[in-house]
Image (tube, helix red, strand yellow):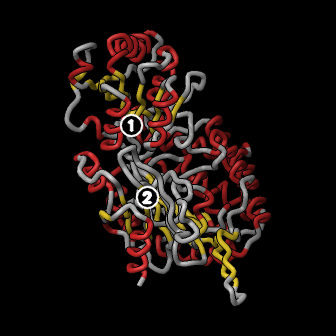
Amino acid sequence: MTTQEILEAARAARSALGLSSGEVRRAALLGMAEALCSPARQQAILEANAADLEAARGHISEVMLDRLALTPERISAMAKGIQEVADLPDPVGKVLRRVERPNGLVIEKTAVPMGVIAIIYESRPNVTSDAAALAIKSGNACILRCGREAWRSANAIVTALREGLRTNGLPETAVCLIEDTTHASANALMTAVGYVDLLIPRGGAGLIRACVENAKVPCIQTGTGICHIFVDASAEQDKALDIIENAKASRPSVCNAEEVCLVHRDIAAEFLPKLARRLGPDRAAKGLHPVELRLDPRAAAIIPGTPAGPADFDTEFLDYILAVKVVDSVEEAVGHIAVHSTGHSEAILTRDEAHAALFTAAGGRAAGPLKKQSTSTAPPALPMAGSSGWGARWAFPPRSSTPVAPWGWKSCAATSTSFTAAARSAEPFNCENIFPFFSYRPPWKDSGLYFCFTGMDCFCYRNTFAPKFRKLFFRLCHDVFFISPFCTKIKSYFYRKLG
């Protein structure tokens, strides 16, 4: 089928999905999972994947080949993820807000399907089932466009998923795979006004930038995964080594792999030699790929390694490479992460509750001494429901004006009212009764409140002069408004904006 024919088929299927009951969609998802694991379909998927691997070998790195590869265990994990998405609460039809006016008029904000969601992603076959499951769960049709290296695998997966849809009375074109893997098909999705209701790019910085710059349909600007682990002075070092090796080397090609390790100066002289030995000679002795360390000057004065270049702390390596920096305090670690992070997943390894609280308030994640967590094993990093209880996710939009981040099954439903917005990691603002579409979080201790409004990012804060603060906000935000942190002025400002 041509790309245009696929667009038309998906648009024709969206009504059936939108009108289907939660029970029907749940049954379809369970059927999709069952079909994925049937011996015949699994064999077809593995054969297609073997052909993809053979064609890609010599053209992409070994790490990327591992990301492309499927095994019976990985297929079973994909099916398990679909089953767990099926068991999540139905987001469609949920009343999000209800207001009864003095004259008796009742106003409700209700979650409804978006329609057709297009997902452009790179050569990760498991994303195919993740995306399809989320779309079906939330009553949406989906159009999938994968990287050319994974097309055979994705096509075999979609064939299995469609069997589950047909068996349960839903149109198989609710899950479509673009057959053209050239740039022309990606551009067609970006400009498919009237056919695509939402576009989600899931991939590297180049893909995301191309979608944001060229899309004429609504698009979520997602972020890459520059994930940090900060080893605090009080961390249990043996457990820290386990966590870092897992987060960096278990699957370095995924977006939640660790890319930067920050180490407190008080333990650097003791910990860094252990880290170098663990990720280098110890792995090599086991026949495992060693990890190259890119060191800042203070780390390089303690252990041998490659001097870190200007871009190394802003790079998603997706390889056996780890940037290492020595910091003086948890505050410096938080400041470094604020400037260099893409907002995916951060972790602190500490036994100091005050440091953990400060780190998490700044948007990171705390791992206590008894929790062997890493950016690869703790939410919000995991992509599947079995480990987080949240369901599969497609993306982590750091600055999106659409419903909720991270983008999960609840967020695939739009609302029947005109205002939706959320902060990345938020609790309700105290004035939520006045501003029901606001939420906030303190980005770090020097800041005030963080607000989002449809199409804009708005911040009010106490300290307007910190250079790192200003640099981060100008780098991350489309529009920045420096306004007073008092509710009365916030209220007045947005009433003017709303006219």
Mark 1 is surrounded, within 10 Å at the Cα level, by few (under 14), some (14 to 19) or many (20 or more) other residues, namely many
- Residue 356 seen in the figure: yes
Q: Residue at x 38, y 61 (%)?
A: 485
Residue 5 vertical position relative to residue 481 in the rendered view, above or below: below
Q: Identify the residue under disc 2.
A: 201
Q: Secondary structure at mark 2?
A: strand
Q: Which residue matches tag 1? A: 318
**First reached walking from the N terminus: tag 2 or tag 1:** 2
Residue 127 image point, x, y percent: 54, 50
Q: Residue at x 37, y 64 (%)?
A: 458
Q: On the rendered structure, is 44 left or right of 219? A: right
Looking at the picture, which amino acid does disc 1 mark? Answer: Leu
Disc 2: CA contacts within 10 A as few (<14), some (14-19) or many (>=20): many
What secondary structure is marked by label 1? Answer: loop
Q: Could you tell me residue 20's position as x and y percent? A: 74, 72
Quadrant position of the C terminus in the picture: bottom left
Residue sticking out furthest to the bottom:
103
Quadrant housing residue 172:
bottom right
Structural distance between the alpha carbons of marks 2 and 1: 18 Å
Whether residue 402 is situated above or below residue 34 in the rendered picture: below
- In-image side of 464 versus 403 (left or right): left
| Residue 50, percent from left and from top | 53, 39
Above or below: residue 271 compared with residue 144: above
Left or right: where 449 falls relative to 15: left
Q: Residue at x 45, y 53 (%)?
A: 202
**Discs 2, 1 touching: Cβ within 8 Å:** no
Q: Residue at x 53, y 65 (%)?
A: 431
Residue 103 in the image: state x and y as whole percent. Answer: 69, 90
User: Looking at the image, can residue 189 be seen?
Assistant: no
From what the image shows, is residue 224 above or below residue 266? below
